[in-house]
């Protein structure tokens, strides 16, 4: 018996939403790699004279690929979690 078979429909929806939030957090971290500024708060007056290059971090196409992979992973996991239980599991209960 799968562990998902013991959950009700509303509990399965909560699992799917939690998985989505976790993947958004991971995606936000992965997309922001390398895009940070080398110093602290950049509006502080002694630091405003520094010029930072405009293009930092990952390329746009790589960010799109990361998000598409995470969305695909979430979709497949959601289908797996939300599909109806097998008949064998229902007969055993």
Image (tube, grey):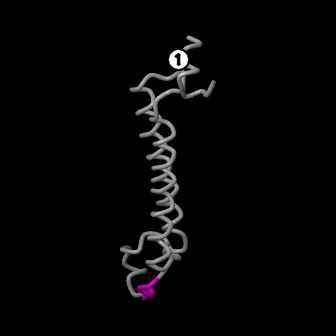
Most foreground residue, 79 or 59: 79
Most foreground residue, 32 or 44: 32
Farthest residue, direction right: 1
Magenta-highlighted residues: 51-55
Where is residue 8 drawn, in percent x and y? 44, 22
Question: Which residue is at 53% across, 22% downward?
Answer: 87
Q: Is residue 33 left or right of residue 24?
A: right
Q: Looking at the picture, does residue 74 appear above or below residue 44?
A: above
Report crowding for label 1: few under 14, some 14 to 19, many 20 or more residues within 10 A (C-alpha).
few
Magenta residues, dominant SS class = loop
Where is residue 79 drawn, in percent x and y? 46, 42
Q: Tell me the element at label 1.
A: helix
Q: Is residue 43 left or right of residue 86?
A: left
Number of dots carrying numbers: 1
Question: Which residue is at 51% across, 77% downward?
Answer: 58
**If the image is split into quadrants, where does the C terminus sit?**
top right
Where is residue 2 drawn, in percent x and y? 61, 28
Magenta-span inclusion, residue 65: no
Q: Looking at the picture, does residue 78 appear above or below residue 47?
A: above
Farthest residue, direction top: 93
Q: Looking at the picture, does residue 43 appear above or below residue 71?
A: below
Where is residue 72 drawn, in percent x and y? 48, 56
Q: Circle 1 is placed at which residue position?
A: 90
**If the image is split into quadrants, where does the N terminus sit?**
top right
Q: Looking at the picture, does residue 49 appear above or below residue 74?
A: below
Most foreground residue, 19 or 51: 19
Question: Which residue is at 42% across, 69% downward?
Answer: 41
């Amino acid at each position: 018996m799968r562990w998902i078979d013991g959950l009700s429909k509303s509990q399965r929806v909560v699992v799917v939403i939690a998985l989505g939030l976790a993947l958004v957090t991971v995606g936000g971290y992965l997309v922001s790699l390398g895009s940070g500024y080398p110093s602290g708060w950049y509006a502080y007056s002694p630091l405003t004279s520094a010029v930072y290059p405009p293009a930092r971090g990952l390329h746009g196409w790589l960010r799109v690929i990361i998000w598409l992979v995470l969305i695909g992973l979430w979709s497949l996991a959601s289908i797996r979690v939300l599909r109806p239980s097998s008949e064998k599991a229902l007969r055993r209960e």
